[in-house]
Amino acid sequence: MMTTSLATVAVIGSGTMGAGIAEVAAAAGHPVRIFDINPKAVDLAIEGIAGRLASRVARGKLASEQADALLARLHPAHDLAALADADLVIEAASERLEVKTALFAQLAAICAPSTLLTSNTSSISITAIAAGVKNPERVAGLHFFNPAPVMKLVEVVSGLATSTEVVEQLCQCVSGWGKQPVRCRSTPGFIVNRVARPFYAEAWRALEEQVAAPEIIDAALRDGGGFPMGPLALTDLIGQDVNFRRDLFGV
């Protein structure tokens, strides 16, 4: 369901997470503008969404009219200026603080003071991201999980300056999208990744020490521990480039 106060959504970054988030917002009825520094990446993202929707239509999970309407709400943006009238911006770009701080400073200058500026970062400090924003109370984390159209949980993360009104507005928006928002403060890893990192790390240490083959480690945790997916397979799904960033792992 579309939240009328946050009618137009902009997504920055058209990789796996950006495309998934754009699909979620469009499915809820929002017009969505998608920007990427590589315009071809936006086209590929929309093609990927179209392919997933076609598969659901073929399996009888989605009406073709619904798929067409969703795709019609996706609009490529050729520059950041095209996002000026967005009510909600969700950044899903590179997991590098310097990239995000520069981007948010630009967005603050382009968008209206009422525009909510959010990041899909999995662990970078929201307070640090908001440092160059004139109105930092409107900056928050909106951390979706992969695949975004399927996973229900969304961490709504507040930095030191984030207002309670903004957090409440984001929670209402996310709930309207059929997701389950959880509120948390901006600490390393937030909730899920902070708790999950030791799980991943010990699995990789077991592999490094040749305790067992990777498929055996995964099978033990999946079949014996009751986890839906083994830790090694899960980190591979998330992306090893994200999991092994030194500033996240500290190793």
Image (cartoon, rainbow, N blue to C red):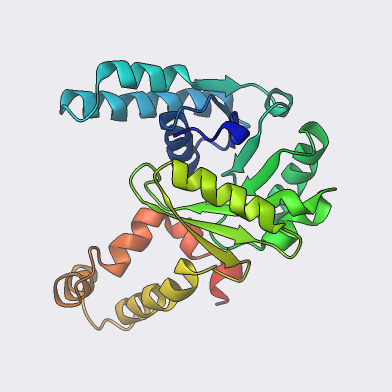
Which of the 4 image quarters holds residue 235? bottom left
Q: Position of residue 106 (x, y in %)?
A: 78, 38
Quadrant including the C terminus? bottom right
Which residue is nearer to you in this view: 179 or 84?
179
Where 78 falls versus 195 (above or below)?
A: above
Q: Position of residue 63 (x, y in %)?
A: 24, 21
- Res. 154 visible in picture: yes
Picture residue at 44% right of the left edge, 73% below the top: 197
Which residue is nearer to you in this view: 95 or 181?
181
On screen, residue 95 versus residue 161, left or right, reads left
Picture residue at 55% right of the left edge, 57% below the top: 156
Q: Position of residue 234 (x, y in %)?
A: 32, 61
Which residue is nearer to you in this view: 7 or 210?
7
Which of the 4 image quarters holds residue 93? top right
On screen, residue 209 versus residue 128, left or right, reads left
Where 183 falls versus 148 (above or below)?
A: below
Picture residue at 73% right of the left edge, 62% below the top: 127
